[in-house]
Amino acid sequence: MMNPQDNKICAYFRDCVLPNNPALEAEILHKDTQKKVCVICDGEFVPVNNRQVYCSPECERKGNRIKSRARMEKKRGLNVTI
Ligand SMILES: [Zn+2]
């Protein structure tokens, strides 16, 4: 990862090889910048928009359930203290 020789090869690849392959360039650069890790299952995914944090509707449902449960427990906690 920290090997400077690798960086050199990558720069050469990016500057000299990729411009001759626009489709390959788009694919590689796109994936590098857009790949994210799902907050629920730790799986990698390419988000449809920048705010997406779940890899699938299933994980989104799980995430929303955890969030709403935390909110409810907070509310319940407030009721007890009052
Ligand atoms: Zn997921």
Image (tube, rainbow, N blue to C red):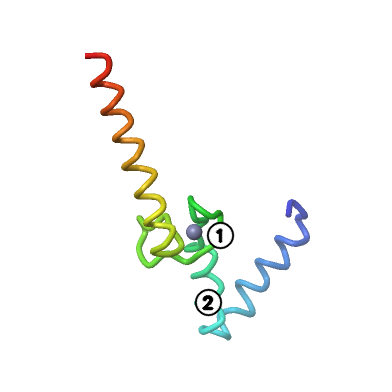
Amino acid carrying label 2: it is Glu
Q: Residue 21 has which mark?
A: none
Distance between the alpha carbons at the discs numbered 1 and 2: 20 Å
Which x, y percent locates residue 15? 60, 73
Q: Is residue 47 left or right of residue 42?
A: left
The label nearer to you, 1 versus 2, is 1
Is 13 left, or right, of 47 in this rendering? right
At label 1, the amino acid type is: Gly
Q: Residues within 10 Å of mark 2 (few under 14, many from 20)?
A: few
Residue 47, given in percent of the width and then of the height, sits at 42, 64
Residue underneath mark 2: 27
Q: Secondary structure at mark 1?
A: loop
Asked whether mark 1 lies closer than 8 Å to ligand 1, one says yes
Towards the viewer: 44 or 65? 65
Q: Disc 1 marks which residue?
A: 43
Residue displayed at 47% across by 66% down: 46
Q: Is residue 19 above or below residue 80?
A: below
Picture layout, residue 39 above or below residue 32: above
The secondary element bearing badge 2 is classed as: helix
Above or below, comparing residue 56 to residue 21 in the picture: above
Residue toward you, 42 or 12: 42
